[in-house]
Image (tube, grey):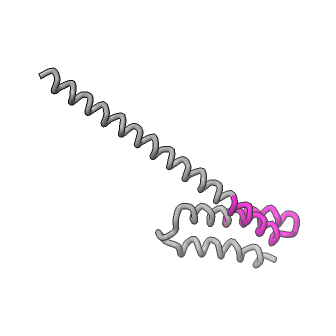
């Protein structure tokens, strides 16, 4: 039974370690969510003498949680980029207005 619990966790962590820098943040979030969920599910499942099923359920929940977290992070980054673009545009308008006023006062 212990091998059944450790195998999904070892596979997930091993695959995550081999990915290097080529893994996208989304893939990393999903993988880490799945691995964390598998470990948590195995730990919880071991109390009911069914750690393997707990690991599988935990991995599934973890993958979904990792995906949702990634989508939240993507939306936050996009909103921050939009805010920065608005600030940059407002700054440029202010610079242009100041330049026009400076030329007009000479």
Instruction: Using the rendered view, name the quadrant where residue 10 is placed.
Output: bottom right
- Residue in view at x 56 percent, y 49 percent: 75
> Which residue occupies the extreme top position in the image?
105
Q: Give yes or no for residue 55 being in the magenta stretch.
A: yes
Q: In which quarter of the image is the N terminus?
A: bottom right
76, above or below 48, in the image: above
Residue 56, how many percent across, how many down?
A: 77, 69
Compared across the picture, whether 80 is left or right of 58 comes to left
Compared across the picture, whether 7 is left or right of 83 comes to right
Instruction: Using the rendered view, name the quadrant where residue 35 is placed.
Output: bottom right
- Residue in view at x 74 percent, y 65 percent: 60
**Main SS category, magenta section:** helix
- Residue in view at x 40 percent, y 43 percent: 85
Q: Which of 5 and 24 is in front in this view?
A: 24
Residue 57, how many percent across, how many down?
A: 78, 65
> Which residue occupies the extreme left position in the image?
106
Compared across the picture, whether 79 is left or right of 55 comes to left
For the record, the magenta segment spans 35-64
Q: Nearer the viewer, residue 85 or 18?
A: 85
44, above or below 22, in the image: above
> Which residue occupies the extreme right position in the image?
48
Residue 102, how many percent across, how many down?
A: 18, 25
């Amino acid at each position: 039974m212990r091998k059944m619990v450790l195998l999904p966790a070892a596979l997930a962590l091993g695959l995550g370690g081999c990915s290097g820098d080529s893994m996208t943040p989304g893939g990393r979030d999903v993988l880490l969510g799945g691995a964390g969920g598998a470990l948590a599910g195995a730990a919880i499942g071991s109390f009911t003498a069914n750690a393997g099923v707990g690991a599988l359920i935990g991995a599934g929940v973890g993958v979904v949680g990792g995906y949702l977290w990634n989508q939240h992070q993507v939306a936050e980054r996009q909103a921050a980029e939009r805010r920065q673009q608005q600030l940059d545009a407002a700054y440029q308008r202010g610079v242009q207005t100041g330049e026009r006023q400076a030329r007009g006062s000479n």
